[in-house]
Image: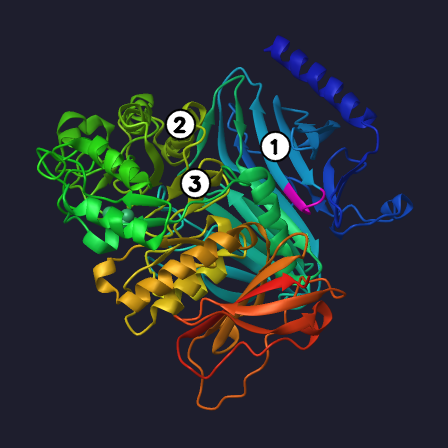
Amino acid sequence: MFKHLLNLLLLTTICTFTAAAAPKQTIKIETNKTSLILKVADNGRLYQSYLGKRLTFDSDINHLPDGIEAYLTHGMEDYFEPALHIQHPDNNHSTELIYKDHKVTTNADGAKVTTITLYDPQYPVTVVMNYVAYAQNDVIVANTEIINNHKKPVVLHKYASSLLSFNRSRYFLTEYSGDWANEANMSQTELNFGKKVLDTKLGSRANMFLSEFFQVSFDTPATETHGEVLVGTLAWTGNFRYTFEVDQNKKLRVISGINPYFSQYTLQSGKSFVTPDFIFTLSNNGLGDASRNLHSWARDYRLNNGKGDRMTLLNNWEATYFDFDEQKLPQLMDDAVKLGVDLFLLDDGWFGNKYPRNGDTQGLGDWQETESKLPNKVSYLCDQAAKKGIKFGIWIEPEMVNPKSELYEKHKDWVITLPNRKEYYFRNQLVLDLSNPKVQDFVFGVVDHLLTEYPQIAFFKWDCNSPITNIYSNYLNDKQSHLYVDYVRGLYNVLNRIKAKYPNVPMMLCSGGGGRGDYEALKYFTEFWPSDNTDPLERIYIQYGMSMVFPSKTHCAHVTTWNRNASIKFKVDVASMGKLGFDIKLTDMSQSDLTFCQQAVKNYNRLKTVILDGDMYRLVSPYSGNHASTMFVSPDKQKAVLFAFDMNPRYNEHLLPVVMQGLDENKQYTVKEINRYNQDDHTVGTFSGQYLMTVGINAFSHNHLSSRVYEINIAK
Ligand code: DGJ
């Protein structure tokens, strides 16, 4: 007892000495346009002094107030939502964090990494805050590491990735919520005293009701071109939570991280917990600028093959659903060839023998070809595709199982399902327990086996149709509250193994439509499926929402039979704003529709580097009226593509010209309308960039569901 007291006294003395001796520090984390300034106060703690437009004079920085603690902890004297809550072995739930040191290094991307170490003077825990500043893109990536140096485990109740605070007059939060086939609806609320929480508890299909990003504009709602706005997104393929809290002084705190809901995490002695990245940008020029920051950052540093090409494709899902065989599929491949796309993608329904996957009620988990449908296996399909000169891709949903499957019969212990309760199902299926390394091996094996047997497979569509239901892991025993976190970590283990062994295979992330999509998953996936809703009118809104954070390169957009009132041209034009694909039978198309599609695919191939890699400008929002327009400009401003849509114009309504952005004012551009339905391209004229960006062109009409595409080239 005496020894213990002596130790404690010694520790306190040393730590107090260290804290008192800590030099007064100011830490500047900067991009080209933003400064995040942290200060160590007299009490040794770290405060966020400033986050806003870049401050260039160091002398000014001394005038900044201390602000709110940079990583607020539970149990101390601030009465608002903490970022960190640790239960120490003696059941003390409080933590105090004192600045120890910080260092600045440069990472492989050339970005500056600021690493700040904090410690608790009474308890042996260390917190390391990391900020990676991408100067050119104006993007900051923040995460936190919590290290337990106790001899015993601690329990983490809250472990946010980041806390940011703001002192402005008013705050306007924009969220993107919805449901299956109705993703990413934009809505805005003003934040007043108290909390607004955006979160998900769905586990695997985590984004089904809410996209994993938000915008907060300051003082006044931001427009595309004006206003100060924070755009943030968590890179975590599971439950997330953003808490926006306005305190009694009208200061806003934004806490972002894994949702702590049923996720108390026991951290063993000597172990560390690294939170996911919170990625944010701050723009002083509105939403468009913020999106372009994130898009360019993602292409340059984050996406799997961010700078590479993307393939156009024909998918058989809506053309056949589960009803296909070895005879039908090569015919669809012929359709792909006729359309001129790069790849044929075989969707759900190719596997299962005891329980053939002829519908969504059985077979999931049994990844062997159904003999009655594919007697000559996938190799026959790969050969057929190769003969026809196209690539072959395949659908999998390896995290899931139907109760009616051999996998379930053999390995019920691998399934997330509650003991002593009746199972309930989402789309007739259950989720495999990826916290279990054996299950990780199995899921990796699905891809590994296919690519070993059929190395010609050039593309995967990875689906995930169920949230985690019946939450209980056979593997985790008394650590049930680890499941949501360990599931996602298990998924990343699998994806890392796939990427290490097959670094060049593109993969599309799908989750019963747009139920997944985040910047951690997109390290492994080249693209994602924003929605099962392919009605082009709906897609204008959905792709608009997703474009706030994710570049068009990641938006899989397919032409289908949804919305028979829309012309093929309207459908193709909408899909051409993303990664173009088709999911349609050519037998459903007239010859002239086919001729149009063939030409549109050629146009797309010619222009896709501008659409997928250029800067995106949302010129007219679908939320603002009856029309929408988006344009893409090559980084050298030599080329652009403009899309204009009439959704539901009123009779004789006053039509405004579409005023462009992003061009060079002093250069002349030739504007040509392309993708005209079986008519030649039409040259509209040659205009200065200044004219196009001041007066604009008449790109809208009074026709319902009509569209125009313009190719804009620098005049020779
Ligand atoms: C849901 C996906 O979103 C669809 O595109 C399709 O792949 C089905 N799953 C297959 O079951």
Disc 3 or disc 1, which is closer to the eye? 3
The kind of residue tagged 1 is Thr
Percent across and percent down for residue 158 are 51, 38
Q: How is the image coloured?
A: rainbow
Q: Could you tell me which secondary element the residue under label 1 belongs to?
A: loop
| Residue 357 visible to an observer of this rendering | yes
Quadrant where the C terminus lies? bottom right
The residue drawn where x is 51% and y is 42% is 519
Alpha carbon of mark 3 to alpha carbon of mark 2: how far?
17 Å
The kind of residue tagged 3 is Thr
Nearer the N terminus, badge 3 or badge 2? 3
In this rendering, position of residue 488 left or right of residue 241: left
Q: Which mark is residue 498?
A: 2
Total numbered circles: 3
In this rendering, position of residue 328 left or right of residue 634: left
In this rendering, position of residue 212 left or right of residue 572: right
Alpha carbon of mark 1 to alpha carbon of mark 2: how far?
39 Å
Residue toward you, 601 or 172: 601
The kind of residue tagged 2 is Ile
- Packing grade of label 3 (10 A; few <14, some 14-19, many >=20) is many
**Residue at the extreme top of the image, as rendered:** 3
The residue drawn where x is 14% and y is 49% is 323
| Residue 316 visible to an observer of this rendering | no
Q: Is residue 656 magenta?
A: no
The residue to which callout 1 is attached is 95
The residue drawn where x is 66% and y is 17% is 8
Nearer the N terminus, badge 1 or badge 2? 1
Percent across and percent down for residue 544 are 49, 62
Percent across and percent down for residue 183 are 39, 59
The residue to which callout 3 is attached is 237
Does residue 545 sit above or below 111 in this rendering? below
Residue toward you, 114 or 183: 183
